[in-house]
Image: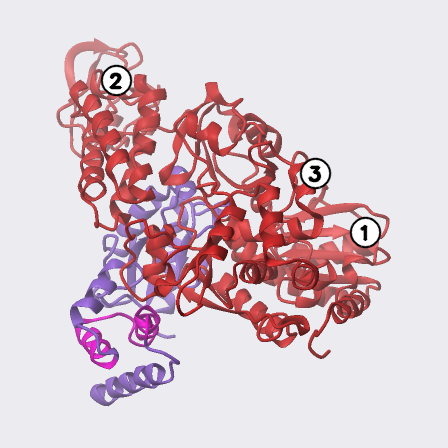
Amino acid sequence: MAQTNEKALYAQLDEFIDGLPTLQGALITVLHKAQGIFGFLPVEVQNHVAKKLDIPASKVYGVVTFYSYFTMTKKGKYRVNICMGTACFVLGAGDILNEFAKEIGVQSGGTTEDELFSLDALRCVGACGLAPVVMVNEKVYGKVKKDDVKGIVDEFKAKGGVA
Amino acid sequence: MAKVKSISDLTAYKNAALAGDSKHIVDSSITRLYVGMATCGVAAGAADVMAALQEEIDKNGVKNTIVIPTGCIGMCYAEPMVEIRHPDGKTVFASGINADDARKVVTDYLMQKQAGEFIKPNVGYGKQVRVALRNCGNINPENICDYVAVGGYEALAKCLTSMSREGVIEEMKKSGLRGRGGAGFPTGVKWEFGFKNNSPSGKKYILCNADEGDPGAFMDRAILEGDPHSVLEAMAIAGYAVGADEGVIYTRAEYPLAVERLNIAIGQAVEKGLLGEGIMGTDFNFTISISMGAGAFVCGEETALINSLQGQRGEPRLRPPFPAQKGLWYEPTVNNNVETYAMVPAIIAKGADWFRTIGTERTPGTKVFALAGKINNVGLIEVPIGTTLKEIVYEVGGGLPGGKALKSIQTGGPSGGCIPVELQDTPVDFETLNAIGSMMGSGGMVVLDEDDCMVNIAKFYLDFTVEESCGKCTPCRIGNTRLYEILDKITMGHGTEQDLVELRQLGEVIKDTSLCGLGNSAPNPVLSTLNYFMDEYKAHVIDKKCPAGACTDLLTYKVVPAKCFGCTLCARVCPVNCIHTVDEIVGNNKKLHVIDQNECIKCGACVPKCPTKAIVVE
């Protein structure tokens, strides 16, 4: 079952690549799409992209590891991102990050064993008026205080694995 | 309406827009509710507010009242907010409201004229002059009608029908517009290089740098979300001037709403024949596409950006050749920043002479700043070049919250420096800020108060630079890492006076020898704080103290013997049992408590427990 599923994902990626007007300079666009499909970019996916675009796998790996947006580790169902821009930093984002680490049980960059949560520090999202800012997937929380953290985590724990 | 095929078509389209969808722009006989729907507004709940307003208006049949979604109004501190323009010319704001409050705005305020707590008077823009942000907050960014109604695409029409390519470049040179991305290079001169350089293929590119990576700067996002067509129009003007038929906008992947609005805007412009082939019935062709970055600060450097557009690692190229000679795909390329582009249509429409009446002789015009940190009115502001820092902080920004003292203003993000309060009368300009060891940069302005430790702030920026250095050149890759390590050592209390000498020496070398702007400016936060806040560095390395109390490793918790009466509460709450009694009798025949400094982990748990406030932090 899992295998056919994976096959379908690769087919989806191939369809996107075949539909591109040109493959010249398309690597980053393709990787964005691939990460959207697979959720992350493991070596197998990178090799597949390399073959498909006819470029060395080392070049794909070089690009994936250069850009912070691309990840080679699987993220949680709920991706908790703490903005670490200057405005958020001076208003205590560091404490918020620590509080989330304590509450979720993983450090920044990590994913919980049940793959429910992952925690990351994020570059400035440009919503400085709401500093400090926390994003859980697409949902934005503004002016977050240390005491709010447990509530936010519990909100998503309650949702659990259900979409 | 069909495609715009001539200047008279554009005028007809404008008139139709003003009579139809865009009548809110001129029709002052109706009440207009503008809802700020940029990322910060939406994040604060503006979509619900807007829906509630519309629903309540419909339900109660409120007449002559319309709701318009708009971009960033600039007052981030008051989001979500609604600007209410009354037929009598009076404007008020409803700020910080939720959907329920929005219903009351309709039922109580609009219908029964009861102001209530949400309605705030119009504070106006004060010292602000809005050029780049002229349409933000006034038009619906997702409807091209609104942009045309305020005179959009007329500057492009003027160029195509009545100005030569050289004439456009001449006008830009005359205006004195300088690149607002940070370097301040004259835009007209840049366009002239692009015009003069030709490759065998004849291909040229126009790029828009929307890779706004400075932490604390968000003006480009606001412009793309609030007035995307102004950027598209300016890129087409640049394309006409230099002879390019293709434009690419390189934007951050972290700005999904900006990308969405740009896509809508490009689609509408193509549909109207304002982009594409044979624009406005002339033989000028111009297309624009969007390319997303993937999270690398260095890609704001233009040669790194070009490499990234080519699907490579975003490492800067050696110059020369300059992008105007060999840029994207090694063809002549002109690249400008979002804010610079946003000013172009206004300059062409109103003329270079008008633009020169704003700002200073050397740098005409305005600059948008993102005001953040310890400031009351966090937001996006636009002031004439030459406005002083003090005016920006106190008159535009409303001063610091909690009556705290201004300590420093950080400008230019990780490439800039920390300006001390003594220099708050400095007028902002590229040269004046450089002269005091900071820089304009992209326009981030972070206000710091007495609680911020300058060594820690320098360390914060270096941490960012070390992470974002692409690693191509050694001074930046290794030098900045060493700077960070020394700063880390100092904030942990292990610094020496020799470290301060080395910080300065290493910083100078990195500035002189790095390959690109990232490395050239990375030591600025360290060097500027060394220059202006040496006493704070000395306190860290000699006295092992952090005057601002931000470096926890340098804090000391002590019991004041005169206040302690031996109640044992502190000792009981201490997680590492480092509070002991000594043989000195205090209070009611009890023993004095002391904290063992070698064991203390500085958690602070004891402080709130003490009934006599005998535990102090130094």
Tell me where residue B359 sits by quadrant. top right
Which stretch is magenta? A24-52
Q: Chain of mark 2?
A: B
Q: Give the residue pinned by disc 3.
A: B123
Name the quadrant of the C terminus of chain B.
top left
Vertical order, B298 against A22 (above or below): above
Please tell me the colour of chain B.
Answer: red
Residue drawn 39% across and 41% down?
A86
Q: Amino acid at mark 2?
A: Lys
The residues tagged by marks 2 and 3 sit, at their Cα atoms, a distance apart of 44 Å
Q: Is residue B412 left or right of residue B549?
A: right
Does the magenta segment cover residue A39? Answer: yes
Q: Secondary structure at mark 2?
A: helix
Identify the residue at image location x=25%, y=78%.
A53
Q: Is residue B304 left or right of residue A41?
A: right
Label of residue B86 in the image: 1
Left or right of B592 on screen, residue B204: right
Cα–Cα gap, marks 3 and 1: 15 Å
Where in the figure is residue B518, as x and y percent of width and height? 32, 43
Please give the residue where the numbered disc 2 appears in the rendered image: B538
Q: Nearer the viewer, residue A93 or B271?
A: B271
The image quadrant where one finds the N terminus of chain B is bottom right
